[in-house]
Image: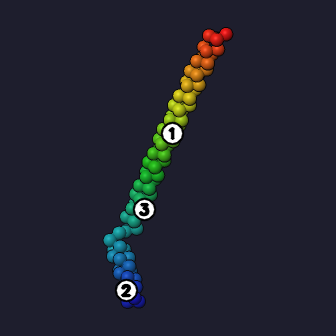
Amino acid sequence: MEIVAAIGAGLGALGGVIDDLIFTDEERQALEAQKAAAQAQMEAARLAQERAMLEAAAKARQAQAITVAAFTLGAAIVVAALVWRTA
């Protein structure tokens, strides 16, 4: 098990050396900036999706409230008509 851990550590160190040979500091900074921009875009998209879901839920609640008000008004009109006819 220790051998596997040592091999993994060696490969990690070798990867770091290869990374240093491949990328300059400016390239690393550019990659980090791109990564940060991509994360910001993903967060903005997530927030836009969440906002759209909340707006849809609000519209559904509003439609439900209008339906309840319409049924209540209809029932009140029927009761008023019944009372008026019996009076």
In front of the other: 28 or 10 = 10
Q: Secondary structure at mark 2?
A: helix
Image quarter of the N terminus: bottom left
What residue type is disc 3 on?
Glu
The residue carrying mark 1 is 57
Which tag, 3 or 1, sits closer to the chain's start? 3
| Sequence-wise first label, 2 or 1 | 2
**Residues tagged 3 and 2 counted as in contact (Cβ below 8 A):** no
Give the structural element (helix, strand or loop) at label 1.
helix
**Pick the front one: 35 or 86:** 86
**Distance in Å between CA atoms under marks 3 and 1:** 37 Å
Q: Are marks 3 and 1 in contact (CB under 8 Å)?
A: no
How far is the residue under mark 3 from the one under mark 2? 31 Å
Q: Position of residue 83 (x, y in %)?
A: 64, 14
Kindly identify which residue carries mark 3. 32
State the residue position of label 2: 4
- Residue 30 circle label: none
Up-down: is 24 above or below 45? Answer: below
- Identify the residue at image location x=53%, y=28%: 67
